[in-house]
Image (spheres, rainbow, N blue to C red):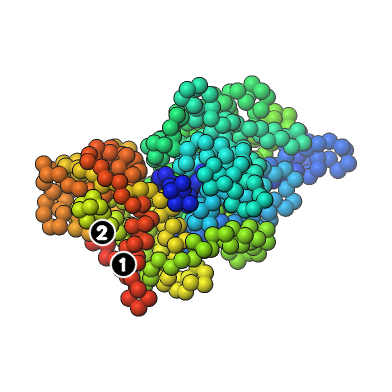
């Protein structure tokens, strides 16, 4: 579920997936006066001249956009809705042309407006944004009137220097300016990174918080990314940085804001949870057994000071609107709006002018679908067309043909059809002796960012896979590594899929053909990988034997909670994952003999 960052190789390829940022629009309407105002109603008094004691601030928020300016394709572009009769509807959603319309429509009639986001606005982006180091997405977010965002882990894919450029502007240090006479001006909104400090100085990398003000109303926003960011980003991306505990950091800055007289506080947290249902309209506060939300955000929410009035979260790409009790036992709103701009959250914050605080019992929130049956925002259409013209010579080049959808990101199964294709491509490209002599290949599931969709995305024709579509699947352009691992280390690595940091939310590696094993989900921890079923080409893994194993540099560095994979020796650096993927498509498909979705029979799953 969670995004798994890896490092772009834009400098090597003129391609990139960059930093992250998120946007939200907020609105406020004057509400009926409180009891002290004797019910004078809207405007506070029918000509008495009193300001109403409370006003409603509408906070519009979203998270994990990942540079998806165009509507995400295939199943990755759908949201689920459960109807009262129990049927589930799949609704196509997302695309900034529609997101802009949704936010602008929601703001109408709301004079108090603030827009916030929960991180990963850029990074792991489709080619339209990634090719240009996500400058198109920052430009789109500026047009959306984003007020503030937290950084996410993907903001660090290309390191702190590139993140600073996205904030402050300036042309790319290697590739320069993309449009003649135009200089990238950076983000109009602040990136907040309260829990990220520079190792040398101990000082925050970016602003820890910002205060939004309008007509006497003041709301503080504190932004943090997950403390575990270094575990899911390549080492170069977080070099020289230290990541601190989310709860301690937010509580520290909440005290500081409180001392400055800012009593209304929202935390933007790039960490999340998993609701019991994937339907966006699920009642997260349902009292039934197994209902509600689980995951890291629950303990974080329970530890954050009551001074904070609401939590906007992200990272897990899930949709939820829940209440989780604060340390004093009072319920507090915790929200997340799925990913890729498919939803936005509309939260009402009732602001008390006398206390300068939010009336917590009046906080209401709901997620809304960014449907594709509403008018497109013309300014976003122009933006997309402009950048598409620049990308076209690279993006539209055919790479291969497929006979049907091959699901990757959109598959919820442990073994994904597209995962098998990618792993097979890596094994085939790196198995020759002079290319590394690989015997098996592993692919991390979070690095598969989309599906391969049969329906044409442009004028290329159905079934044609373009470079842009292939890039959207594998936007990091990680370099491949082939290393020596013992059979014992191989077994340990497979067990680490479901144990240690991955126990609560397993990360099932996609494996190349020839590797088979049983995954028994009725067991717990490492035992879920049944060790004596692990075979390579029909033979049991020999703990003492050395195997040549192919994987991307992120996994080879022990990323995603796989320290055993980081123990490899005798490393050979190969081509990029994207180059191997495209080469495989070219070798295994033609217009008359397209590549079919492979069988998913490598991992036997016991539920």
Pick the front one: 23 or 309: 23
| Left-right relation of 180 to 68 | right
> What residue sits 53% from the left and 39% below the top?
163
Q: Position of residue 83 (x, y in %)?
A: 50, 62
Badge 1 element: helix
Q: CA distance from mark 2 to mark 1?
A: 10 Å
In the rendered image, which residue does mark 2 sit on? 428
Task: Give yes or no for contact between labels 2 and 1 (Cβ–Cβ under 8 Å).
Answer: yes
Pick the front one: 374 or 448: 448
Pick the front one: 209 or 548: 548
Does residue 265 appear in this view? no
Badge 2 element: helix
Q: Is residue 413 above or below residue 45?
A: below
Q: Position of residue 246 (x, y in %)?
A: 47, 31
Pick the front one: 413 or 159: 159
First reached walking from the N terminus: tag 2 or tag 1: 2
**Number of numbered callouts drawn:** 2
| Left-right relation of 303 to 448 | right
User: How many neighbours does mark 2 have within 10 angstroms: few (below 14), some (14-19), or many (20 or more)?
Assistant: many
Does residue 587 appear in this view? yes
Q: Is residue 409 above or below residue 350?
A: below
**Which quadrant of the figure contains the C terminus?**
bottom left
In the rendered image, which residue does mark 1 sit on? 587
Q: Is residue 260 above or below residue 94?
A: above
Q: Position of residue 458 (x, y in %)?
A: 52, 69
Q: Quadrant of residue 311?
A: top right
> What residue sits 78% from the left and 45% below the top?
42
> What residue sits 62% from the left and 41% below the top?
169
């Amino acid at each position: 579920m969670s995004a798994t960052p890896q490092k772009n190789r834009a400098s090597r390829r003129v391609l990139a997936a960059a930093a992250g940022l998120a946007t939200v629009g907020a609105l406020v309407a004057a509400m009926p006066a409180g009891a002290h105002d004797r019910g004078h109603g809207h405007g506070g008094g029918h000509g008495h001249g009193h300001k109403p004691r409370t006003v409603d601030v509408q906070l519009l928020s979203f998270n994990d956009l990942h540079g998806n300016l165009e509507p995400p394709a295939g199943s990755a572009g759908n949201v689920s809705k459960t109807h009262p009769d129990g049927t589930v509807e799949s609704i196509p959603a997302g695309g900034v042309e529609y997101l802009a319309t949704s936010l602008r429509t929601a703001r109408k009639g709301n004079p108090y407006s603030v827009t916030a986001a929960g991180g990963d606005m850029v990074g792991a982006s489709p080619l339209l944004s990634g090719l240009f180091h996500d400058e198109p997405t920052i430009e789109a977010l500026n047009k959306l009137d984003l007020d503030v965002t937290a950084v996410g882990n993907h903001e660090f894919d290309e390191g702190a220097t590139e993140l600073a450029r996205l904030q402050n502007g300036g042309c790319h240090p290697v590739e320069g300016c993309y449009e003649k006479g135009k200089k990238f001006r950076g983000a109009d909104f602040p990136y907040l990174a309260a829990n990220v400090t520079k190792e040398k100085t101990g000082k925050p990398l970016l602003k820890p918080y910002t205060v939004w003000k309008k007509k006497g109303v003041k709301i503080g926003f504190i932004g943090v990314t997950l403390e575990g960011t270094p575990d899911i980003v390549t080492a170069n991306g977080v070099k020289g940085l230290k990541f601190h505990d989310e709860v301690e950091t937010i509580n520290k800055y909440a005290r500081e804001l409180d001392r400055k007289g800012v009593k209304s506080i929202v935390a933007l947290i790039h960490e999340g949870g998993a609701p019991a249902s994937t339907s966006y309209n699920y009642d997260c506060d349902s009292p039934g057994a197994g209902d509600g939300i689980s995951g890291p955000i629950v303990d974080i929410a329970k530890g954050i000071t009551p001074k904070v009035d609401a939590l906007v979260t992200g990272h897990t790409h899930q949709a939820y609107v829940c209440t989780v009790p604060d340390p004093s036992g009072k319920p507090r709103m915790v929200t997340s709006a799925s990913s890729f701009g498919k939803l936005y959250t509309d939260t009402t914050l009732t602001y008390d002018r006398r206390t300068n605080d939010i009336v917590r019992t009046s906080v209401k929130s709901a997620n809304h679908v960014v449907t594709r049956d509403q008018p497109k925002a013309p300014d976003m259409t122009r933006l997309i067309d402009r950048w598409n013209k620049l990308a076209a010579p690279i993006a539209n080049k055919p790479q291969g043909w497929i006979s049907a959808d091959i699901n990757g990101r959109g598959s919820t199964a442990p073994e994904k059809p597209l995962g098998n294709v990618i792993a097979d491509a890596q094994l085939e490209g790196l198995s020759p002796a002079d290319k590394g002599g690989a015997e098996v290949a592993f692919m991390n599931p979070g690095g598969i960012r989309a599906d391969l969709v049969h329906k044409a995305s442009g004028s290329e024709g159905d079934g044609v896979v373009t470079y842009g579509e292939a890039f959207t699947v594998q936007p990091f352009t990680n370099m491949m590594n082939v290393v020596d691992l013992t059979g014992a280390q191989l077994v340990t690595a497979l067990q680490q899929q479901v144990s240690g940091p991955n126990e609560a939310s397993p990360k099932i590696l996609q494996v190349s053909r020839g590797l088979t094993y049983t995954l028994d989900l009725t067991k717990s921890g490492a035992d879920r990988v049944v060790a004596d079923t692990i075979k390579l080409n029909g033979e049991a893994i020999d703990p003492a034997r050395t195997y040549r194993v192919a994987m991307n540099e992120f996994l080879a560095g022990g990323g995603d909670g796989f320290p055993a994979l980081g123990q490899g020796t005798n490393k050979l650096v190969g081509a990029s994952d994207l180059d191997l993927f495209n080469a495989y498509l070219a070798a295994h498909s033609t217009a008359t003999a397209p590549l079919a979705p492979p069988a998913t029979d490598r991992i036997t799953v016991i539920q």
